Amino acid sequence: MATFLYKLGRFAFRRRHAVTLLWVALLALAGAGAATAPAPTSGSFSMPGTEAQRAFDLLEERFPGGSADGATARVVFKAPDGQKMTDPANKARVDKAVADLRAGSDQVASVTDPYTAQAVSRDGATAYIHVAYKANGMELTDATRDALTKTGEEARDGGLTVEIGGDALQAMPETGTGEIIGVVVAGIVLVVTFGSLVAAGLPLLTAIVGVGIGVASITALASALDLGTTTGTLATMIGLAVGIDYALFIVSRYRAELAEGRDPEDAAGRAVGTAGSAVVFAGLTVVIALVGLAVVNIPMLTKMGVAAAGTVAIAVLIALTFIPALLGYSGRRILGRKARKAPGEGRSDAAGSEGAAKAAADPGKKDGDREAAEAAPNGGTRWARFVLRRPIAVLLVGVVGLGALAVPAASLEMGLPDDGAQPTSTTQRRAYDLLSEGFGPGSNGPLMVVVDGDRDAAAKAAGTIRKLDGVAAVTPPLPNKAGDTAMITVVPKDRPSSTATEDLVHDIRERTGEDVLVTGQTAMNIDFSQKMNDALLPYLALVVGLAFLLLMVVFRSVLVPLKAALGFLLSVVAALGAVVAVFQWGWLGSVFGVEQTGPIMSMMPIFMVGVVFGLAMDYEVFLVTRMREAYVHGERPGEAIVTGFRHGARVVTAAAVIMIAVFAGFIGASEQMVKMIGFGLAAAVLFDAFVVRMAIVPAVLALLGHKAWWLPRWLDRVLPNVDVEGEGLRKRLGDDADRPADPDADRPNRLVGV
């Protein structure tokens, strides 16, 4: 593979005009497709195999035109102190609001009159109008939403307190600010890392081009493939992350090759042949993690995963072709100004490498002499040597620290946040509080019970439900025209996201027959959480198992992939523990803007596994591949660790800081779900990059020594040799002519096949 990629890199460097025009043309083509394509909808959300979905399907069949899965709104009114909503003046304002809502949009399916629907509180101070729409929340037009808010404003002008809840006002969270913050921080980090505006600009430019092509393609195909408006969100986040990462590693290796005295074209080929091999396999691990979301069997998540995987594939292709083409334009300007002016440019690093090789050839040479022969140590070198001196202490501190952070994860409660988790500044949260005060917290999430039977069966089911604990109210059954199906509305005593409400849903399903189905937004959330929980272990097994096999091919080792997978699990569980501590327990909640604690978003564990696994394996592949490359080329295990950190630590650190900044930018979002995702991903990358990859990994490798690279001979014969470390490329280019003999070639624990 390294030889093929070397040729590809040189080709792109020489044919830079054609390659650049090709990528620009693809961007223009995708942009034109997105501009002319029909506007995307929210996509059809379904959960095959769940009771809530079966109930929705039954409602669509037996109550045609009822829009069972349509958006809803609750316009909540509260009378001024000393007045009641039944007072004539207040009643007149509510009647006008009902009429305005019915005439406000052709997307309205029904509007209930609170005075005939028993939607006035016992004390008469609060009332609400329930509005059902024909379309779901993301498909409502701006005119429909404007009519809803205008109705509330007009009633408010009459002296009433009016707030609007429900999902009718739901909109896509604004993520632009987080992305802008991430790009700005990325630019600063890249300038500091490279000391060159050209080198800093290339990863940003190519990442933006890759994300642009990916998201524009998703938009262009959205209508034809029924892709929702949320499909591009994950693609944008992951595409930006890996796009910067992959370009960063290629550019860094190109600069290192220039410093070795290579001519620019050869340096570009070698950079793509070596770092590019790591990019290919790192990209494959991300694709596996994203496509693996199909295991959950929720079409929306499957489409999101496949779309994001496509964007990652584009990022890999850009790194292998567009980056070397742009390097052809930049030449030596990719180096910092001081490096370009240095008269002996490139000689110090080459001399250092030669000295290191000579030191490796003399096993009797003391560590101090060996270090003196190497190039001037940087921060990565010093840290690696520190870990090599105290591997057990570093390993214990890292594992115990992450283990302590992971403790809260044992108390993880999953669900989907309701309007009660919204900031108090929003009308949805204020409507939630008014309903809780006037009708009880359960009124914010009524359950819809569908009875597949006649009137007697419906009456029997209603009677059974009334006797259950946790039920605040049960409406009389509402039959369809045929009389073979009925709907019953059940109001729980507790709030929608509480465990008591979840227990009530399970009780209804257990106490009533198979012909009684529970659905509604609250039940859908409960079933969604259960489905995500059931899919977590199969998803972990699939993703980690396939990636383990892939990493065995990359590293030609059994223990290194095992260590990588276990370290990733440790960092993810620690990050989940931090999320539970902040968002479920409320620790430091005020610091992160958490206004109400509650269950953790049900898709959070799987989402973190998919996203963080891909990024973690990026850092693992880029850092450890350089170590294996040094080991294969004759360095002892400890020296290989130092070499890997000398060349890779700074770049991996920069990549991790960029990702943390990108994700942390979402913590300031008003939506609690977005805030939780940003916090969880930022914490996971922090733990994985700086604790697992930078501390635990070198400590484990130091303790294992040669055994880290052990591979059974039979497995070595079975696994394909993809030459990620570029050994075949070095031989082809004649780099091994002057390489000293390896004194450890006959050691019993030496890597098989080297």
Image (tube, rainbow, N blue to C red):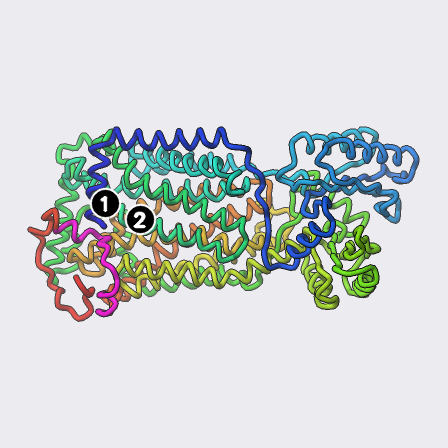
Task: Tell me which amino acid carries mark 2.
Answer: Val
Look at the image and tell me in which quarter the C terminus lies. Answer: bottom left
Q: Is residue 729 magenta?
A: yes
- Dot label at residue 280: 2
Residue at (24% x, 63% y) in the render: 709
Residue at (39% x, 29% y) in the render: 28
Q: Which residues are magenta?
A: 713-731
Label 1 SS: helix
Kindly identify which residue carries mark 1.
5
Residue 484 position in % (x across, y down): 78, 57
Task: Tell me which amino acid carries mark 1.
Answer: Leu
Left or right: residue 507 versus residue 742 is: right
Whether residue 418 appears in this view of the structure is: yes
Mark 2 closeness class: few <14, some 14–19, many ≥20 residues within 10 Å: many
Label 2 SS: helix
User: Decide: marks 2, 1 in contact (CB < 8 A)?
Assistant: yes
Q: Is residue 7 above or below residue 93?
A: below
Residue 225 position in % (x across, y down): 51, 42
- In this view, the residue farthest toward the left is 738
Q: Is residue 3 above or below residue 197?
A: below
Pick the residue in front: 438 or 594. Answer: 438
